[in-house]
Amino acid sequence: MPLFVSHQPWAAPLRRPRMSNAEDVRPGLSLTDRYLTRDGVPLIPVSGEIHYSRIPRERWAHRLRQLRAGGVTVAATYVFWLHHVPERGRPRFDGNLDVAAFVDECVAAGLDVVLRIGPWCHGETRNGGFPDWVRDAPVRHRTDDPAYLALVAEWFGQLATALDGRCDPARVLAVQLENELYDQPAHLVSLKRLARAAGLSAPLWTATAWGGADLPDEEVLPLFGGYGDGFWVDADAPWDPTFRDHYFFSHVWDDPGIGADVRRAHEARLAAVQPRTPSPHFPPATCELGGGMATAYHRRPRPAGLDVAAVAHCKIGNGSAWQGYYMYAGGTNPALPGGAQESHATGYPNDMPRLGYDFHAPVGESGALGGSHPELRRQHAFLAAFGASLAEMPSSLPAVRPSGVDDASTLRYALRSDGERGFLFIAWHQPHQPLPHYRDARFRITLDGAELLFPSHPVDIPAGTLARWPLRLEAGGVRLEWATASALTFLPGAVPTLVLTAEEGIDVELAVADSLDGDGVTVRAVRPWPEPVRLSTSDGGRLDVLVLAPECAPKVWVCEDGPARRLFLSPAELTWGSDGRVSVHGGEAAVYDPSAGAFVPLPLEPAAAPVAGNAAASSFPAGGAAASVAGGAAASSAGGAAASPVDGSTVDGAVGVREVRPAAGTVPVSYGKHEGRQSAPAPEVFEQLAAVHRLSPPDWAADPAFDALLRIAWAGDVAELRLDGRPVTDRFWDGAPWTVSLRDAGYRPGAELTLHVLPLATGSTVHLPADARERLLAADGQLLAVDEVRVIGRPVRREVSRT
C-alpha cells in the first residue's frame, strides 16, 4: 500500500504582527505569522552562531566568508557581559571585543546580524555571562528587582555607546533578550524597555521559547531549538527521548530537554504548562538547532555530520520559517582570571574545557570545516533557491506516523505544499540506534488539483537517506511532476537548469508533463551527471535537469553572491565575499557552465608567494601535483616536505613528536564529583600528572601563506597545547582527531610547541562515544597515546577577476 499524505492548507488567514510592521521598521522588511519578507518576497533566513569574542579579530572576515559560503545569511552572536566588563567601571570594547567592528564586518560580508545581548547568556560561560561582581551583587538576578535593573541599564548603556548607533533596524536584524528565561514574561518586557532607552533597537525582538517558557504576548518572537544529543544529561543516561524526538517530523516545536540541567530551580515557579507549538502571532523559527555539540568532562557526545543535518532537515519539513544554528563556528575562550568557562567551581553541573569551544561545529575552533558543513550547505542552497515558494507552503504530516521515538519501522516523511506544488521530505537516519533499510516505498500525494503516485515502482529507502523531492515544479515552461532526487538549486539561463542530487541506492526517475495544460506524463529513468537531461514539451517549454551523483554531494558549493548564482564542484574549501569572487583553499574547483551543459575549470590566480625571508621559501621541492576536482587534494608528506605554495595544492607534512616527560604514574579513576557528575582535574593536578611532548613542525608551518592546521590523533583524558609555555587551547578526548590553527595560536619560527596529555583510567565512568569507549576498555589500566601529528597547509588562490 502506498505511503499517503494529503496537503493541508493554512489554518488561518495571513496576519502581520506589530513587530517590524508598526514599530522598529526597516523599509522593505516585514514579519508575518508565517514567514519573513524582504521587498514583498518571502524568505527563510539561515542564522549561524559565531562569537566574535571567542575568535581572533583578524579572523572575523574569513570566518564570516565561511558562513556565507555555507549558505548562512545571518550572523548571530552572544554579547557576553563577562567578557566586556570583568571589572565594574572598566568596560572593554577593543581587539576581539570590538563588537561595533564585528557588526561592520558582518554588513560588509553581506550578512544580517542578531545580537543576543543577555544580560544572562549562558553559552557555557562562567556565571552564564555575568561578571563576578554582578553575580555577587545583593540583587535578585534576572528579575525586575530595581537594583538588578540598574545594573542592566548600566551594561546596556555601555554596549550602546560602543555600538555607536549600529544597533538599529537598518543594520541589526534582531536583538535577543536574555536566554532560557522561563517564568518572567514581565522581566523580558522590562529588558526590552531598557534596551530601547539605551538606544538599542532592531526590527525583531526575540527570546528563547523552549522548556515551556512563559513569554510576553506579541513582545518577542519565540525561537526554538533542537539538539540530537547533548552534554547536559548524566554520564550514564541513555540516548534521551528529547534528543531522539528531533529525528521525526512533528508540529511540536518545544524541546523540554534543552537547558534542563540549569532549569530545575525555575520549574517549580512556572504557573502553568505552556504551549509547545509556536505562537499564533509568529512563524515557527529556531535559533539553536545543534550545529554540533559541546564536550563536557563527564559526557562527550560526538555528532556526525549526518546527525546534525537530519535534525535540520526535519525542521524544514516541519515548516521552519527560520533555520538557526548553535554553534555554526566554534572558537576559543578568552583567558580570564578564574576562567571564562562554565564549571563545577562556579556552581554549574558541568565542567567544560577552559579554552576550547570547538562544539564540533560546521566551522570548527581552528577554522577547519566539519562533516556537517557540506551536509548543511546543500540544505541552505535549497532554501536560497526555493525558499520564496517554500515559505508559502504549510507542512502536512501523514495520517500514519511513527508511534513514538522507539518506532524504527514506520517511514518518516512530510509534505510542504501550497496545494499546487511542493516538496516531499524523507528523513531516514538517526544516530546511536541505526535504522534498517525501508523496503518497497511508494508515495501517494494528494494536492488540491492533483494526486501523484510515485515512483513508477516501489523503491527501497537506505538508512542515511535525507531527501527533498520536488512535486509539480514549473520552470522554463516545463512542469516536472515529480522526481526521485533532491532539489538543490536552480540556475537561470536561456534554458534554465534545475539541479538535483541523487540519493545513494535510489534510482532517479523524472516524471514530465507533456505540456503545462495537458494531463499526459512521461516517466524517464535518468543517470546522474556528467550531462544534463533536456526536457521539452509540445508547447515549446525547455528545461535542463542536472542530476549530480551521490559521490558529488560533499563537493557541491552554490554561490548566491555576485552577478548570478553559480554551481561549483570542489573537494577543497571555497569562500567568497559579497562580490561572489571565489577563493579556493588548497586545491582546484570547477564551475558549471549552463550554456555548455558541463563543468569547466575555474580560472585561478597563482597562490601567494611565501613570506620573504621565511625559511620555508627555500625548503620546498619545486612543482607538486595539483588537486583534481573529482578527487582529493594533492599532498606530499615524505620527511615533512611539501609542494610549493605557488601551485595551490594542499600540503601535508609530518610533525616530529618527542616525549620530554612521561605521565607521572597512575591516574585516579575520579577527580571528584559535583551533583553526581565527574569533575575535571584541577589545573595543578593536570600539571603534575600529564605527559609532555615537544612538537616540531616543518619550517613551512610558520609561513602564513599556508594557514597551517595542526592535526593531532591522540587518546587520553584531557590535553592542552602550549606555545612557549602558554596554553592556547585544550580538549577533552572523545575519539576524534584534534585540529588546531597554528596561525591562531601565534606559532612562529623558533617557538616551543608542547602537547600535554593526561591519561584516562580504564575505570573512568565518563561517557564516551562507542568507539572511544572500546579503545579505553582495551587499554591496560589507563589510556594515553599520541598516534600521529601532522600539519596541513592550504595555500589560497583567488578566482581570476571577472571584470
Image: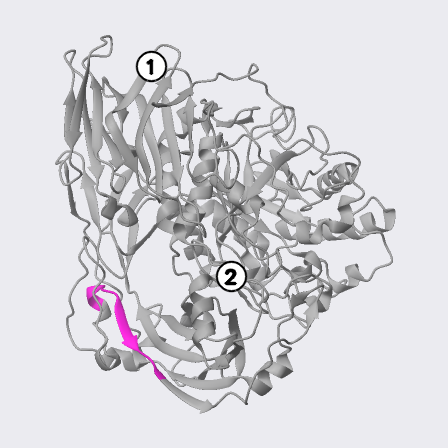
Residue 568 is inside the magenta segment: no
Look at mark 1 in the image and give the residue it sits on: 451
The image quarter in which residue 476 lies: top left
Residue 527 in picture, x, y percent from top left: 15, 36
Look at mark 2 in the image and give the residue it sits on: 331
Which image quarter is the N terminus in? top left
| Residue type, mark 1 in image | Glu
- Disc on the earlier residue, 2 or 1: 2
- Is residue 460 depicted above or below 41 in this figure? below
Question: Mark 2 and mark 1: span between their CA atoms?
Answer: 50 Å
Question: Horizontally, is 345 left or right of 308 in the view?
Answer: right
The image quarter in which residue 631 lies: bottom left
Question: Horizontally, is 422 left or right of 344 in the view?
Answer: left
Q: Does residue 488 appear in the picture of this structure?
A: no
Give the residues drawn in magenta, as a range: 646-656
- Is residue 524 depicted above or below 714 in this figure? above
Residue 582 in picture, x, y percent from top left: 29, 50
| Residue type, mark 2 in image | Gly
Q: Nearer the viewer, residue 689 or 288?
A: 689
For label 1, the SS is strand
Q: Nearer the viewer, residue 185 or 405?
A: 405
Question: Horizontally, is 239 left or right of 310 in the view?
Answer: right
Q: Nearer the viewer, residue 234 or 541?
A: 234
Q: Does residue 18 appear in the picture of this structure?
A: yes
For label 2, the SS is strand
Residue 429 in picture, x, y percent from top left: 40, 44
Q: Nearer the viewer, residue 694 or 334?
A: 694
Residue 678 in picture, x, y percent from top left: 64, 69
Measuring 29% from the left and 49% from the top, which residue is drawn there? 554
